[in-house]
Amino acid sequence: DAGVIQSPRHEVTEMGQEVTLRCKPISGHDYLFWYRQTMMRGLELLIYFNNNVPIDDSGMPEDRFSAKMPNASFSTLKIQPSEPRDSAVYFCASRGTSGVRTYNEQFFGPGTRLTVL
Amino acid sequence: AQSVTQLGSHVSVSEGALVLLRCNYSSSVPPYLFWYVQYPNQGLQLLLKYTSAATLVKGINGFEAEFKKSETSFHLTKPSAHMSDAAEYFCAVTSSDGNKLVFGAGTILRVKS
């Protein structure tokens, strides 16, 4: 299994530009999570999906952030317009249920390091 | 609400010494507990998990953790630290609805030669 795949691994953009981060969860997993990690705030849950449906987006910082999951194998996190304070590492994670208890173990991708100048 | 407290944002040990990373949790339901490790510039990797099968849980790389309900603790230990153990460690508990993980703030482990 390839694990959770994220792209790009690094993104440098200028303030005001649109940024799109991509995630491919582990095949068969029905939960997908987006996190943001910064030195100041640590690891924050932004939003999570179950069966492609957003369940809880209370962690999304503001309307500039949006996330979609058009199918079971792909999700995007978009920031428009981007600001320097959005600079962080963004992680995607997935987990499965599949009728067998997985005890909520999440599998993390390698992250996307975003720098907004 | 579920919460996790990791005592000590930074822990420094000598190579070969005991590693002890502390985690206390608060949970309104029987908890599932996890330790994750994050090496520099990488994602989080599961070290071990407590799922009520056994109170002493063994994980990868020689780490283990003991679930103590009376103390609401799930401390992570390793008898002998290696330089390669230098990383950030996160303790996590399942949310009350069972869908999410609630993470602690993390502990950065430094191993001195």
Image (cartoon, coloured by chain):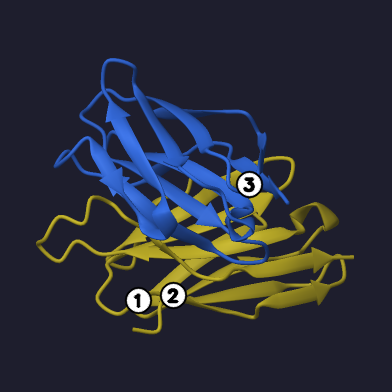
Chain colours: A yellow, B blue
**In the rendered view, would you say B20 is above or below A68?**
above
Reading the chain from its start, which is encountered first: label 1 or label 3? 1
**What percent of the width, then of the height, locates residue B62?**
41, 54
Q: Are marks 3 and 2 in contact (CB under 8 Å)?
A: no
Q: Residues within 10 Å of mark 3 (few under 14, many from 20)?
A: few
Mark seen at residue A61: 3
Eye-nearest disc, 3 or 2: 2
Amino acid type of disc 1? Ile
For this view, does A109 lie left or right of residue B106? left
* Label 3 SS: loop
Amino acid type of disc 3? Pro
Reading the chain from its start, which is encountered first: label 1 or label 2? 2
Within the image, what quadrant is residue A16 found in? bottom right
Mark seen at residue A4: 2
Q: How many marks?
A: 3
Q: Residues within 10 Å of mark 1 (few under 14, many from 20)?
A: many
Using the image, name the chain to which the residue with label 2 belongs: A
* Residue bearing mark 1: A26
Q: Are marks 1 and 2 in contact (CB under 8 Å)?
A: yes
Is any part of residue A54 visible from this angle? no
Q: A28 or B26: which is nearer to us?
A: B26
Is any part of residue B40 visible from this angle? yes
Which residue extends farthest front?
A: B16
* Label 1 SS: loop
For this view, does B16 lie left or right of residue A82? left
Q: Quadrant of the N terminus of chain A?
A: bottom left
| Residues marked 1 and 3, same chain | yes
